[in-house]
Image: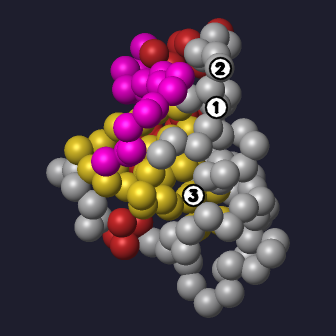
């Protein structure tokens, strides 16, 4: 990736992440519809591949926006984890945010991947798929 978040030679593909039995997908701390939809799409992908999969967010506050509360009716398994002391088992994927950036709590993790549509903020791993030309992360 270059400093703007544009791919230099090739972009990470989801199939490259299938070597992990456990996958945790983390939305940013104040998840919006884009973060939740993106995370749920990844959740379904990995779950359907037989992986032990979790979808969560952290931070100070639980989701309280009325339009997002309606998403509960869709039975999206979004967990609120205000803090985590144990290291994430397997792979942690941050979605619609970048691990180490200001809008996402850094959960302890040995393996990290990033999927985001915002410009590059932090280089935290080689496993990054950034496409700032996209209007939403769910488009990825």
Identify the mark nearer the N-term, 1 or 3. 1
Q: Which residues are magenta?
A: 73-89
Neighbour tally class for label 1: few under 14, some 14-19, many 20 plus, Cα within 10 Å: many
| Residues at circles 2 and 1 in contact by the CB criterion of under 8 Å | yes
As helix, strand or loop, the secondary structure at mark 3 comes to strand
Front-lying residue, 40 or 120: 120
Q: Is residue 18 left or right of residue 125?
A: left
Checking the image for residue 115, the label placed there is 3
**Outermost residue toward the left?**
50
| Image coordinates for residue 105, horizontal then vertical, percent | 61, 38
As helix, strand or loop, the secondary structure at mark 2 comes to loop
Neighbour tally class for label 3: few under 14, some 14-19, many 20 plus, Cα within 10 Å: many
In the image, residue 7 above or below residue 37: below
| Residues at circles 2 and 3 in contact by the CB criterion of under 8 Å | no
Identify the mark nearer the N-term, 2 or 3. 2
Total labels: the figure holds 3
| Image coordinates for residue 36, horizontal then vertical, percent | 54, 34
For the point 27% across and 60% down, the residue is 20
As helix, strand or loop, the secondary structure at mark 1 comes to loop
Question: Label 1: which residue?
Answer: 29
The image quadrant of residue 10 is bottom right
Checking the image for residue 44, the label placed there is none
Let me know if residue 80 is in the magenta part.
yes
For the point 42% across and 60% down, the residue is 111
**Outermost residue toward the bottom?**
9
Mark 2 to mark 1: distance in Å? 8 Å
For the point 38% across and 45% down, the residue is 88
Question: Label 2: which residue?
Answer: 60
Q: Is residue 87 left or right of residue 106?
A: left
Q: Is residue 88 left or right of residue 1?
A: left
């Amino acid at each position: 990736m270059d400093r703007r978040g544009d791919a230099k030679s090739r972009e990470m593909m989801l199939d490259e992440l299938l070597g992990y039995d456990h996958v945790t997908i983390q939305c940013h701390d104040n998840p919006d519809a884009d973060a939740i939809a993106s995370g749920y799409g990844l959740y379904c992908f990995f779950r359907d591949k037989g992986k032990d999969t979790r979808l969560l967010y952290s931070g100070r506050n639980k989701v309280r926006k009325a339009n997002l509360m309606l998403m509960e009716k869709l039975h999206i398994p979004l967990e609120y984890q205000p803090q985590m002391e144990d290291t994430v088992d397997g792979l942690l994927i941050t979605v619609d945010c970048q691990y180490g950036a200001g809008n996402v709590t850094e959960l302890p993790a040995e393996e990290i991947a990033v999927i985001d549509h915002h410009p590059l903020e932090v280089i935290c791993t080689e496993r990054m798929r950034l496409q700032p030309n996209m209007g939403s992360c769910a488009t990825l």
